[in-house]
Image (spheres, helix red, strand yellow):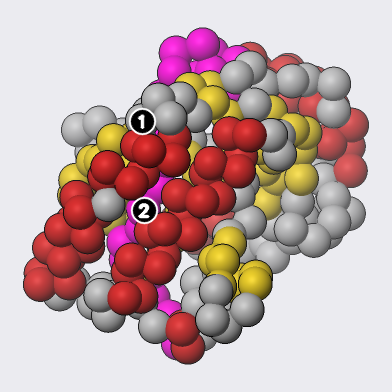
Amino acid sequence: MNKFTARHFLMIPFEDEGFIQSYEDLCSKLKSENPENFDPELLQKPAKLHISALIMDLKEDPQKINKVCEIMKGIQDEIKNISEGNITYKFGGYGTFDSFKSARVIYGKMLEDGDFLKMEKIIDLIIKSLISEGILYESELKDLHVTKAGSNDNPFYKIQMHLTLLNTTFLNKVLKKQKKKPIKTFDATKIEECIRDEKLVDCPLKKIDFCVLREDKNTGKYEVVQSFDLV
């Protein structure tokens, strides 16, 4: 994403205590078994677990930021109609964008069930609404990792839904402070073997947060501009 600077994003936070405990158990297993190429700094902080719906470059423009909030408020009823009062993330295994031999990210997949389809419809609705209001443009969707299914007359916008668990970006922030060379990828074969049989528990998803891509020092979470109901 050479020309694109992400500063804001819409995301679905994972805040259920049972799920957080399940993730922390997974982290403990990795730390105790310490498989080859594992570094604890690769791990996502429990307070920041989320699925990204969409990243955006709003150029810190307050009018655009307010517009996104207005658009999200305007589609609240439609979102709730799609969710039908419940969306639960069910764990569908571990994945990586490339291969476990050459990984940047290890993520939790969402089981492709009825709730997954609800999430897809909600994300399509959000993207269409942002395009129709001039916040997003078709020309930048590729940089935003959005793909288009269907026809031009009746498109369906999709993202690769993933729950990031380990990421080289987290480790590279630490390496930068230590003035060490960053890593592009790591061989996660042994890490995958270590966690292969560890199943994360179900997590009810309750809201969509519109966030700034920086940490709120008071909460340890991403800095929230505004929250919207998912169910």
Structural crowding at the residue carrying mark 2, measured as other residues with C-alpha within 10 Å and reported as few (<14), some (14–19) or many (≥20): many
- Drawn side of residue 204 relative to residue 94, left or right: left
Could you say where residue 158 lies in the image, as x and y percent from the top left?
Answer: 58, 62
What type is the residue that disc 1 sits on?
A: Val
For the point 72% across and 25% down, which residue is it?
30
Can see residue 87?
yes
Pointer 1 residue: 231
Residue 213 falls in image quadrant: bottom left
Can see residue 38?
no
Question: Relative to residue 22, is residue 70 depicted above or below?
Answer: below
Q: Nearer the viewer, residue 109 or 231?
A: 231
Q: Nearer the viewer, residue 221 or 170?
A: 221
Q: Nearer the viewer, residue 156 or 169?
A: 156
Viewer-nearest of labels 1 and 2? 1
Residue 6 among magenta residues: yes
Could you say where residue 43 lies in the image, as x and y percent from the top left?
Answer: 59, 37
Pointer 2 residue: 10
Question: Relative to residue 189, is residue 132 depicted above or below?
Answer: below
Residue 147 is labelled as none
Residue that extends furthest to the front in the rendered view of this protein: 153
For the point 60% across and 19% down, which residue is it?
202
- Drawn side of residue 209 relative to residue 46, left or right: left
Could you say where residue 46 lies in the image, as x and y percent from the top left?
Answer: 47, 28
For the point 77% across and 20% down, which residue is it?
198
Q: Secondary structure at mark 1?
A: loop
Q: Quadrant of the C terminus?
A: top left
Q: Which residues are magenta?
A: 3-23
Q: Are marks 1 and 2 in contact (CB under 8 Å)?
A: no
For the point 64% across and 26% down, which residue is it?
90
